[in-house]
């Protein structure tokens, strides 16, 4: 006689350990084969193949996005988003299934790629969710719209799918759910109502000057000096124009100018990334950035700089009523000790566009996928966007699938 070890996903759903093993294999495949934002062609094809094996209809949306529709009679419609893109990071986890993927850029340079943010766990959990709901139709009723979204890291994917007719081609949901893995202990969930993440804006600033020989500065308008003054002055926005209780970050991530030490160049270029907690603060900070850039150029007798907007992230706002409903489900399935009120972090997320575009509530939460032993003595494992970020496969699959099931069944569950 043989026995089958089972794994509890929610208070009402157990699966055999072999189910988790199957999706660990899926996770390891995805982890070993990441793709950059907008290039998720093989990932999309893999998702489509897994869905087809389950008999689930799907369609492409936003070029590399995949939308799957699970129907089970009359009932609510719920959207669930899983992002799919990787990052330009050289993996250093030492995992047996580490990514060795590289891509060649148009300029001939080679860039490493890694699932350094955990989107591979999000895809896997969504596929496992689809499997459970396909096999356990007696537990739910209604329609689930699974959104495998590309390009989250560059803030283009959600808008690309919307612009490609997502909500004209798929049933309109009454709520859109999404989740994210964090470097936290397995079995923990993080959620709050209101703003769950910050708004973000990235700009490229080109400062124009007048080129001259390094020995003849009087014939130049030095864009390096002007741009340097801008970089320094920009930091006073947070320290001197916002209340200490208002969280915001202005980061200058790149600065490029010149080709030779004895030539004052005609341009300097830098990029900035801005994180703000709400729409009013965003408007005030971005206006201050424009003011300072323009004023510092004028102080240097330089032409008006060119500002190029690279990307922007929307609000990630958890509707209070919908969040309360999800918290109630999480509490019933996992207990009050599993839940922590999420702090307002400075990370950003584009899932909010999916719900805001059609005026329905959104709810976004995070889950842990690491051994509690790693958090002893005040230490923590490497975080998202690190070359060492390595969620534990079993914990990630169980944690992500469990939370997804609990959240979806809060709306679609028969009980």
Image (tube, rainbow, N blue to C red):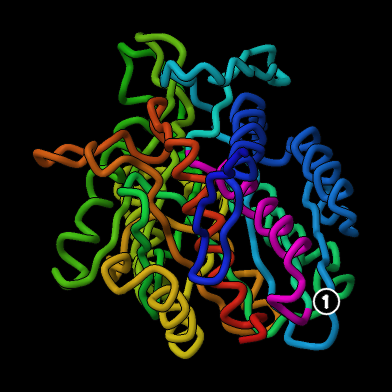
Depth check: 71 or 149 in front? 71
Q: Position of residue 105 (x, y in %)?
A: 69, 20
Quarter-of-image position of residue 231: top left
**Above or below: residue 62 compared with residue 32:** below
Depth check: 19 or 208 in front? 19
Q: Position of residue 344 (x, y in %)?
A: 31, 66
State the predominant SS element of the stretch in magenta: helix
Q: Is residue 313 visible?
A: no
Classify residue 127 as left or right of residue 315. right
Quarter-of-image position of residue 257: top left
Q: Position of residue 375 (x, y in %)?
A: 20, 41
Residue denoted by label 1: 72
Q: Secondary structure at mark 1?
A: strand
Going 48% across and 31% down the picture, which residue do you hit? 267
Classify residue 207 as left or right of residue 376. right
134 in magenta: yes
Mark 1 Cα-neighbour bin, 10 Å: few <14, some 14–19, many ≥20:
some
Which quadrant, please, contains the C terminus? bottom right
Q: Which residues are magenta?
A: 117-142
Numbered label tally: 1
**Above or below: residue 117 compared with residue 324:** above
Classify residue 225 as left or right of residue 223. left
Going 21% across and 70% down the picture, which residue do you hit? 242
Which quadrant, please, contains the N terminus? top right
Q: Is residue 112 visible?
A: yes
Farthest bottom residue? 321
Going 69% across and 76% down the picture, which residue do you hit? 139
195 in magenta: no
Depth check: 263 or 340 in front? 340
Q: Position of residue 243 (x, y in %)?
A: 17, 73
Classify residue 236 as left or right of residue 102. left
Going 80% across and 36% down the picture, which residue do you hit? 41
């Amino acid at each position: 006689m043989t026995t089958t070890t089972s794994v509890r996903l929610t208070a009402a759903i157990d699966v055999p350990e072999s189910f988790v093993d199957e999706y660990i294999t899926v996770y390891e495949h995805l982890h070993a084969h990441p793709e950059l934002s907008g290039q998720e062609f093989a990932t999309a094809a893999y998702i489509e193949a897994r869905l087809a094996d389950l008999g689930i209809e799907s369609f492409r949306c936003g070029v590399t996005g995949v939308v799957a529709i699970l129907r089970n009679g009359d009932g609510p419609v719920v959207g669930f988003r899983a992002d799919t893109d990787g990052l330009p990071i050289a993996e250093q986890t030492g995992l047996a299934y580490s990514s060795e993927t590289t891509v060649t850029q148009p300029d001939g340079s080679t860039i490493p790629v890694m699932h350094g943010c955990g989107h591979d766990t999000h895809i896997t959990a969504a596929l496992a969710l689809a499997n459970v709901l396909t096999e356990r139709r007696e537990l739910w009723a209604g329609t689930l719209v699974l959104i495998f979204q590309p390009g989250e890291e560059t803030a283009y994917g959600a808008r690309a799918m919307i612009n490609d007719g997502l909500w004209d081609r798929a049933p309109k949901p009454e709520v859109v759910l999404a989740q994210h893995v964090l470097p936290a202990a397995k079995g923990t969930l993080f959620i709050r109502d209101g703003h769950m993440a910050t708004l973000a804006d990235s700009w490229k600033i080109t400062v124009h000057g007048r080129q001259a020989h390094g020995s003849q500065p009087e014939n130049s308008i030095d864009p390096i000096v002007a741009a340097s003054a801008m970089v320094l002055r920009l930091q006073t926005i947070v320290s001197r124009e916002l209340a200490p209780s208002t969280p915001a970050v202005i980061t200058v991530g790149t600065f490029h100018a010149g080709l030779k030490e004895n030539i004052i160049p005609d341009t300097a270029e830098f990029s900035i990334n801005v994180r703000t907690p709400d729409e009013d603060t965003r408007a005030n900070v971005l206006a201050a950035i424009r003011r300072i850039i323009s004023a510092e150029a004028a102080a240097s007798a330089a032409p008006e700089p060119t500002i190029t907007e690279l990307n922007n992230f929307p609000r990630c706002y958890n509707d209070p009523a919908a969040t309360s409903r999800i918290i109630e489900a999480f509490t019933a399935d996992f207990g009050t000790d599993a839940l922590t009120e999420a702090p307002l972090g400075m990370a950003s997320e584009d899932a909010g566009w999916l719900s805001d575009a059609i005026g329905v509530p959104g709810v976004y939460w995070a889950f842990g996928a690491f051994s509690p032993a790693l958090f002893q003595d005040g230490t923590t494992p490497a975080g998202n966007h690190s070359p060492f970020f390595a969620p534990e496969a079993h914990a990630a699959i169980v944690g992500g699938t469990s939370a997804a099931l609990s959240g979806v069944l809060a709306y679609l569950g028969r009980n």
